Image (spheres, rainbow, N blue to C red):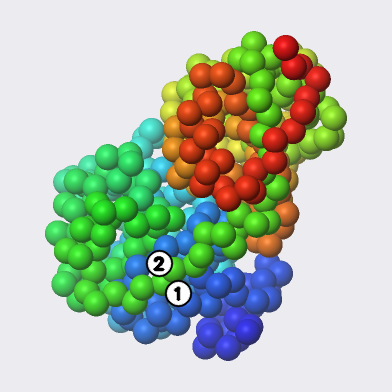
Amino acid sequence: MSFQSLNLVEPILSALRAKGYTQPTPIQLQAIPAILSGKDVLASAQTGTGKTASYSIPMLQRLSGNRASQGIRGLVLAPTRELAVQVSENLTQYGKHLQVRNTLVYGGVSQVNQVKDIRGGTDIIIATPGRLMDLIQQKVITLSKLEILVLDEADRMLDMGFIADVKRIMNLVPAQCQRVFLSATIPDAIQKLVSSILRNPVRITVAHEKGAVKIHQSLYYVSRQDKKALLKHVIAEQQMKNVLVFARTKHGADKIARDLTKSGILAEAIHGNKSQVARQRALSNFKRNSIRVLVATDIAARGIDIIDLPFVINYEMPDTVETYTHRIGRTGRAGAVGSALSFCDHEEMPQVKSLIRASSGRIQVLDHPFVN
């Protein structure tokens, strides 16, 4: 099955060919026709399955085909600034041959340029909920002409406490507006939201196991004091050029990055205490290989979309299987094979027991030189 078979217009097909896209992923194959039909959609798909393109492409096509209406006609809500930036980049790339403009709206930076771009005319807003509500209340943004709304990573919206804002935004959307929800998981709270907001939605589920089988998962049992040495050892031994390391805290992320850099392994940290400019600079440095290691907290890592990311390391274990799945989903994307390594100390054993049960034997326990 090719993108041509999905009845996409030539300007979009040309942009996809330029990016080297030939065949749609399973989520794209199902979601693109459903969204083009104008129906509400609820899609569940793991990170790394091509979900951003699955809604960006049909959104661009629908809005490019209807130029009679003026104003903001498309809205993508994202839980983090990083994801919002990534969505905007994708919309710009897929729509480079179309006259459809998009504008980023997020907090942590001055709103002056964002307001200027909106007042200059835009078709699609990509926004985090807090800043969007601010600009709505200032009457800079109105949603009265909205034709399609996408809620990306709905489960993370819930985790981060944005659901109240999402509900308020939904109340400002025209009744006839198409609504698309995407989520890695569908917890009860999201299901309740779906029932109250979506109308007879097309339901799409892409099995999570499809992404996981392309990720080699390994686990090291290691004392807390030896984690630092083990991290340097595996980076050197496996000659890692690009590795994303997860830390539990902002302070911990900074400490890991500083220690690696002192050892000659260039690293930077991204977390919520960093300015948006600093976070984007670190991510850009990582993408162009100016640094070898990016150390991130869970929230800051949302929206990191790097196709060629071979290694993810859990320096500290996450609290839930769901968070672990989100973390390792940063590697093994777009059909590539990735490796996920986890460091488990004695205090983290309860989380690991749950993880091993849920993994059905896919996590391999490895030996290392730092055994006490």
Q: CA distance from mark 1 to mark 2?
A: 8 Å
* Above-or-below relation of 41 to 107: below
* Above-or-below relation of 163 to 225: below
From the image, tell me which residue sits under label 1: 31
User: Residue at 64% of width from left, 15% of height from top?
Assistant: 223
Tag on residue 43? Answer: 2
* Above-or-below relation of 5 to 223: below
User: Residue at 63% of width from left, 19% of height from top?
Assistant: 256
Tag on residue 279? Answer: none
- Res 20 → quadrant: bottom right
In what element is the residue under mark 1? helix
State the image coordinates of residue 369 (x, y, percent, origin top left).
81, 20
**Relative depth, front residue between 115 and 237:** 237
State the image coordinates of residue 113 (x, y, percent, origin top left).
39, 43
For the question of whether residue 239 can be seen, the reply is yes
* Above-or-below relation of 324 to 37: above
**Relative depth, front residue between 224 and 37:** 224
